[in-house]
Structure formats: C-alpha cells, structure tokens
Amino acid sequence: MKTQQLAITGSGMVCGVGLSAPASCAAIRCALDNFQETNFIDSGGEWIVGSSVPLEEPWRGITKLVKMLAKVLPECIACDPGIRLEQVPLLLCLAEEDRPGRPEDLDNRVFNETQKELGISFHPRSAVIPKGRISFAMAMRDARILIYEERFPNVIIAGVDSLLQAPTLTEYEERERLLTSDNSNGFIPGEAAAAVLVQPPRDGQNGIVCTGLGFGQEKAAVETEDVPLRADGLVTAIQDALTEAGCQLGTTDFRITDLSGEHYGFKEASLAMTRVMRELKEEYDIWHPSDCIGEIGAAIGPAMMTVLLAAMRKGYSPGNSVLAHMGNDDGARAAMILTYQDRRTG
C-alpha cells in the first residue's frame, strides 16, 4: 500500500543561536551555542545556564512565545509567494498539559494573541496539539488527513516553547533533570520557535519527504524506577515507520533526534538501534540540535526538520535518507523516515 507521503518544502526558525532559519542552521552546523548564565539560580546558589532567544525587547512568558511564533510563520511560507497565512491550516505544537510550570490557558492565549500580533485570523481548520516533543509527529499524521482527505494544498506545522520559566526550572531541578552545579546528568533549558510548510510531493519542488510515521509507548519512562529500560516504545515507533516506508533501517544514512543531554535518552536510543538495525554500518551518525540550542520542548520537531532541510539542500548531510525520532517524559514515542527529493531535476 502506498503511503500518503508529505513533503516539507519551507521552514522558519528562531532560537538561541539565530533569528532566522538560515542563521540558526549555519550556527548549528558550526556547533555554535549561546549557552549563558540566566537570571535563575539553582539550589546550590549558582546561576543556571540556558539558551535564550535574544529578541529586540526583553519579553517574557506568553508574550515572548507569541513574538517568536510571529517571526517564523511568515518565514516558512516565503518560499512560495502565492501562499497567505490565513488561507493555510496551522497545526500548532505546544507543551504537554502536565508540563511543569505550563502557563495557564496556554493554548488559547498563544493561538489568539499570535493572530493579533500578525493582524490575521488563522484558517478555521487550524488546531493546537499540546503534546510536547512528539507534537510534530502527531501534527504530520493530522496533516495527512488535511491534505489527502480534505484536499488542502498546504499545511503549516509550527512549534513554540520555552523552559526558561522559574516554576519549570524549579521543578525540573527538584526532579534532578536539570543541568546544574550539583547535577551533571541533566539538560540545558532553552526556548525556540520553528515552523515548516507541508505539501503533497509534486514535480518542481525540492524538500524532505516523510515516507513513514510510527508511534509507541515506553513503559520505562525517564523517571520510572521499577521497570527495566528495553526501549520497547521507541522500537515499536521505528519499526512501524519503517513498515510504512517499506524499507529497512540499514537503508537510512543517519538519524536526528530530540536528545538533550540526559543519559537516559542516549541509552534508550542505543538500545533501540541494537534491536532494529539488521546490518553492520561503519558509520551511522546521530544529530541532536539541542546540543546547540538547549532543550526546547514542543519546538524541537519543526526545528529538527528545519536543520535537515538546510543540510540536505546545501549538501552537507551524511546522506539523503534519515531516521528521526523523539519522545516525551511520559513514555510517548514517535519516529519518522525521511528522504530528500529534488524534483526540479527529475
């Protein structure tokens, strides 16, 4: 059965190392970061290191989320001058509802205030997907319906998030998840917004084509202590994505993930590879943009796609076929098989 494939053809991004997709991707390619001491102090009395987005004003909270999102949405459709934001369904990825320090009424406020910031009304088929890091994969699943069943020619998937909030940092530090002066096994908090333009594959375009999509549920989540980690959830997600794509993992050239510094994520990813990879590969690179921009929550999915799109168009990726995977703290896992196709040259 032929998979309902989706092409990612445009992108926009702001993060701690760039205020546009080209600037962000260039910095990440060079392994630059903007990790600096924040205004928050850990329990040991030391400044918490983070990656903040240097906007023109010192906005914070939901206002800053709106400002970041309003920058990336126009950028991601700039590749097609005929597209107008109000005519395209927007699938907006936000922090999961139980995320520590999540602002009250986040979904409605970000959605509505971004419309005011841009001076438009989003398309009626737009929706918010508050599922954290796997939001992007869920949005891709919804985009298939919009494009192949409802016949929309374009869909925008965007994500915006910030972990640089006092309640968020306090709880993650208490749970020993944050990188601090007393904990080396933790992540660096960041913030970002990213958006991608999704279309059905067609002649005359070049972009990343999603050929397979899969989901799983891990019982041994990051804070679970009584269940041994076997990476069952990630293995299921990868295998389902490979089945949809009709290929083996060995045919992919590298992988890109949402890993952000905690040992758990790297251990899980390694276990999954030993269970799914059926052939020996001399090199199988793993990219994790969070090394440069910190943990950016729900923005990581479209940020990963932005990094991939730039790398493949400019020819500095290890290949044209990639496994992407991501996961939430509650054990939800998602995986995608992506291939670069340049249909302008046949």
Image (cartoon, helix red, strand yellow):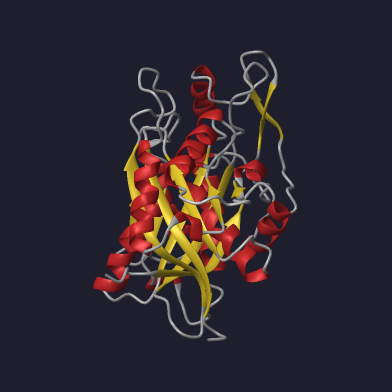
Image quadrant where residue 41 sits: top right
Image quadrant where residue 318 sits: bottom right
Q: Is residue 52 left or right of residue 138?
A: right
Vertical side of 261 occupied by 191: above or below: below
* Residue at 57% from the left image edge and 48% from the top image edge: 192
* Residue at 33% from the left image edge and 43% from the top image edge: 216
Viewer can see residue 126: no
Q: Is residue 323 left or right of residue 97?
A: right
Q: Position of residue 19 (x, y in %)?
A: 66, 56
Out of 181 and 216, give the one closest to the viewer.
216
* Residue at 37% from the left image edge and 69% from the top image edge: 5
* Residue at 75% from the left image edge and 53% from the top image edge: 30
Q: Position of residue 149 (x, y in %)?
A: 24, 72
Q: Position of residue 303 (x, y in %)?
A: 55, 54
Question: How many marks are shown on the rendered structure?
Answer: 0
Name the outermost residue toward the top.
44
Vertical side of 33 occupied by 102: above or below: above
Q: Position of residue 36 (x, y in %)?
A: 73, 35
